[in-house]
Image (tube, rainbow, N blue to C red):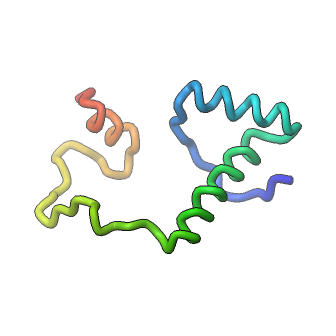
């Protein structure tokens, strides 16, 4: 049963979404429940393994916001990331 929680919007790969919808139909449950189960599995693995290993992540202490990009608008960020500006 779905526990009402935070609503959000995600961009999901088409093939992955189709497969997730198939799983929901097979299990006679909602797409939300399938996505939540997947997230729980990933979070559980991370917790089991002691969290993410951030030691290898690149870190920049000189990075600054890019002029003309509104960091509160995901569409602007996506456009920039995909070089659609």
Q: Is residue 40 left or right of residue 85?
A: right
- Above or below residue 20? Residue 56 is below
Task: Locate the C terminus and report the quarter of the image it occupies.
Answer: top left
Q: Which of the 4 image quarters holds residue 31?
A: top right
How many marks the image carries: the answer is 0
- Above or below residue 85? Residue 77 is below
Residue located at (76% from left, 57% from top): 4
Residue located at (67% from left, 46% from top): 35
Q: Is residue 7 left or right of residue 76?
A: right
Residue located at (27% from left, 62% from top): 56
Q: Nearer the viewer, residue 17 or 84?
A: 17
Q: Is residue 21 left or right of residue 60?
A: right
Measured as percent of width and height from the top left, residue 40 is found at 66, 58
Measured as percent of width and height from the top left, residue 69 is found at 25, 44
Measured as percent of width and height from the top left, residue 64 is found at 16, 57
Measured as percent of width and height from the top left, residue 7 is found at 64, 51
- Above or below residue 63? Residue 83 is above
Residue located at (75% from left, 29% from top): 22
Q: Quick one: which residue is furthest to the left in this view?
A: 62
- Above or below residue 40? Residue 79 is above
Q: Nearer the viewer, residue 30 or 66?
A: 30
Q: Nearer the viewer, residue 43 or 48?
A: 48
Q: Quick one: which residue is furthest to the front in this view?
A: 49
Q: Is residue 46 left or right of residue 3?
A: left
């Amino acid at each position: 049963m779905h526990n009402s929680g935070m609503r959000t919007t995600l961009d999901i790969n088409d093939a992955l979404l189709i497969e997730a919808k198939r799983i929901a139909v097979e299990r006679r449950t909602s797409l939300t429940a399938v996505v939540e189960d997947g997230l729980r599995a990933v979070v559980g693995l991370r917790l089991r393994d002691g969290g993410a290993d951030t030691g290898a992540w690149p870190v920049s202490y000189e990075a600054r916001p890019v002029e003309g990009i509104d960091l509160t608008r995901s569409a602007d960020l996506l456009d920039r990331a995909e070089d659609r500006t």
